[in-house]
Amino acid sequence: MSTDVAPQFDSLMQDVRTQFGSDSTPGFQLGQPQRTDAAVGRLSANALPPREQDESLLSAKILIVDDEPINVKVCQKYLHELGYKNCLGLTDSSRTIAMILDERPDIIILDVMMPVVSGVDVLKLIRKHDELQHLPVLILTASSDRTTKLTVLNLGATDFLTKPIDPSEMAPRVRNVLAVKRYHDTLRTHAQALEEAVRQRTADLEASRLDVIHCLARAVEYRDDHTGRHVERVGRFSAIIARAMKLDASSVAMIEQAAQLHDVGKIGVPDDILLKPGKLTPEEFERMQKHTLFGRKIVEQMSEREWEKLRQHVQIGGRILDAPRSPLLSMAARIALTHHEHWDGSGYPLGLAGEDIPLEGRITAVADVFDALSSHRPYKPAYPIDKCLMILQSESGSHFDPEVIEAFFSQRELIVQTQLELADSQ
């Protein structure tokens, strides 16, 4: 060695011995410092270069779980010296889950070898808990057993810390885990914000769609100024029937809205047909009372040409509401097209029979006829509910689906309540 270099080398080695201890200390190896308090202080102070420090991570809450109190205190000391001030300790591992849920730490430093409830058992509980599945867990162990490491890795351990703890190793491991957690938290928060925005946008679109439906329904009412709140009642009655038939809540809500558009096709019917007064003589009125279908009572007074024009309203309605991208409007289109079909196949415009008629069409048919029978019109009084039900029952199995009639009859109290609530203003 050069005589110029030797003094500098001797001086460097003296500094090393002063900091880490004498090279005669058993087990001493250059580069593996002895864990004296003084050495720990100097190491931890310099564990992270200033440019790598992240003050936002230092506010993280860290929970240390170890059955040995001295191990908890040592770990807390190291973390404090690294800048982490919010460090909690727990020596009773059976309370780990409860404390996690109460304190909501950002990271767990978990010992493996503990009595009663081991670290492996705690890790299993953490990963099975819906709210804690992604909580970072650093496993603290003195074991070099490969099987143990594989076990905790398979259970979802985030990383390892080996006993005795080396603060220079702890610093980057804790920091890296917290940085990844912060990134995941940011993604989760962003995803939640997007989900909320989607929910709000969906709600806005749903509100707009319902506004369109109500506007179309009102347009029909204003064209036929004798029907009053007919479309509202038909929608409500249809929902009552659907609910009684055990349809799911979303289907019930959809049919209530869609059924209100059952007569939207009247928009395309000429006024001289739609608004025909239909004033009846007493004899004609008596004949009308004997018929079961309100619609038939109206059209029987018309010529064949007028009848053909009027019956086209279901086809017009189907075309108006032909919107396959909207489940609600698609259902409304089916209702508009099929609510005059008969269970026995004698209806129009397609002559469908039985279950070939969409269920929503069968339901709306009952709701529509009942409201027509039970409502006042210029050419007829409102029939008492018992008479309305008798007429409907007489048409069960011919005009109406018997199961729909049965469901409707089972809701008599709610039907009457709806009539009172949505009664036409006189």
Image: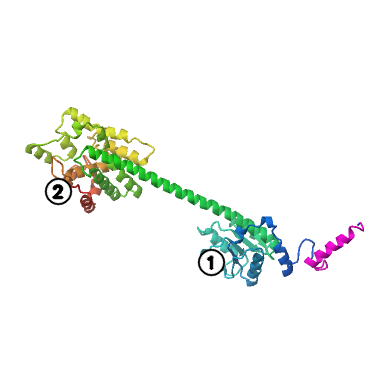
Quadrant where the image shows the N terminus: bottom right
Q: Is residue 360 visible?
A: no
Q: Which image quadrant for residue 87?
A: bottom right
Give the mark, 2 or 1, whose residue is nearer the N terminus: 1
Along the viewing direction, whichever of 146 and 136 lies nearer the viewer: 136
Q: Residue at x 83, y 62 (%)?
A: 12
What is the total number of numbered labels drawn onto the structure image?
2
Q: Is residue 371 magenta?
A: no
* 248 sits to left or right of 306: right
Mark 2 residue type: Pro
Label 2: element kind: loop
Q: Position of residue 106 (x, y in %)?
A: 57, 60
Mark 1 residue type: Met
Read off the magenta span.
2-27
Q: Residue at x 58, y 56 (%)?
A: 156
Give the Cα separation between the discs numbered 2 and 1: 67 Å
Toward the top, the furthest residue is: 305
Q: Is residue 16 magenta?
A: yes
Q: Which image quadrant for residue 7?
A: bottom right
Q: Position of residue 227 (x, y in %)?
A: 20, 41
The relative height of residue 300 versus residue 395 in the rendered view (above or below) is above
Q: How is the image coloured?
A: rainbow
Residue matched to label 1: 99
Badge 1 density bin: few <14, some 14–19, many ≥20, Cα 10 Å: some
The relative height of residue 351 versus residue 233 in the rendered view (above or below) is above
| Label ID, residue 384 | 2
Q: Position of residue 5 (x, y in %)?
A: 89, 57
Q: Residue at x 21, y 50 (%)?
A: 419
